[in-house]
Image: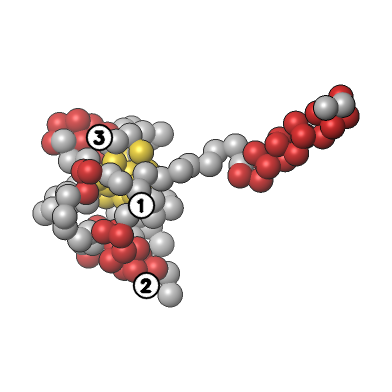
Amino acid sequence: MSQSASNKKASDETVEDNRRGPFVVEPKYDCPHLGDRAYILLQDDQTTENHQPPCKDCQNIEENWACLHEDCHFVGCSRYQQKHMLKHHETTRHNICLSFSDNSVFCYACDSYIDSPQLQGLNLQLSRRFR
């Protein structure tokens, strides 16, 4: 392979990487911590008047997460704020939570964003919120 062909191939690979973006997140599709239940967001924990529900510990209203553990109503701020959702996970072992910033779902046990057919009801509920 010639030097120019080698440089073109490396350049094409760089362009392809840049199309995906520097912060591409690949969700996990087989999180074993979801269990076998359907997930929904409780009415009390939903965004109102274009504001996220406040963190239960510090009252922050930016970058908050809702715990999706059954019958848990905890809302905590992100690891980029005061880490109250992370602390909630560490004390309760509630693994699954939803970001109010971008509607992503995260599993602390897998340390991964997740996507699953079990989240279909939650995704539908969230899409209706923005109509």
Q: What residue is disc 1 on? A: 115
* Figure disc tally: 3
Vertical comparison of 64 with 49: above or below: above
**In the rendering, at what x and y percent does residue 116 appear?**
32, 55
Which of marks 2 and 1 precedes in the sequence?
Answer: 1
- Local crowd at mark 1 within 10 Å, few (<14), some, or many (≥20)? some
Q: Quadrant of the N terminus?
A: top right
Q: Nearer the viewer, mark 2 or mark 3?
A: 3
- Three-letter amino acid code of the residue under disc 1: Asp
| Callout 3: SS | loop
From the viewer's perspective, tell me whether residue 75 is left or right of residue 91.
Answer: right
The label on residue 109 is 3
**In the rendering, at what x and y percent does residue 36 appear?**
16, 55
In this rendering, does residue 53 appear at all? yes
Which of marks 3 and 2 precedes in the sequence?
Answer: 3
- Res 39 quadrant in image: bottom left
In this rendering, does residue 41 appear at all? no
| Callout 1: SS | loop
State the separation of the CA atoms marked 1 and 2.
18 Å
Q: What residue is disc 2 on? A: 128
The label on residue 103 is none
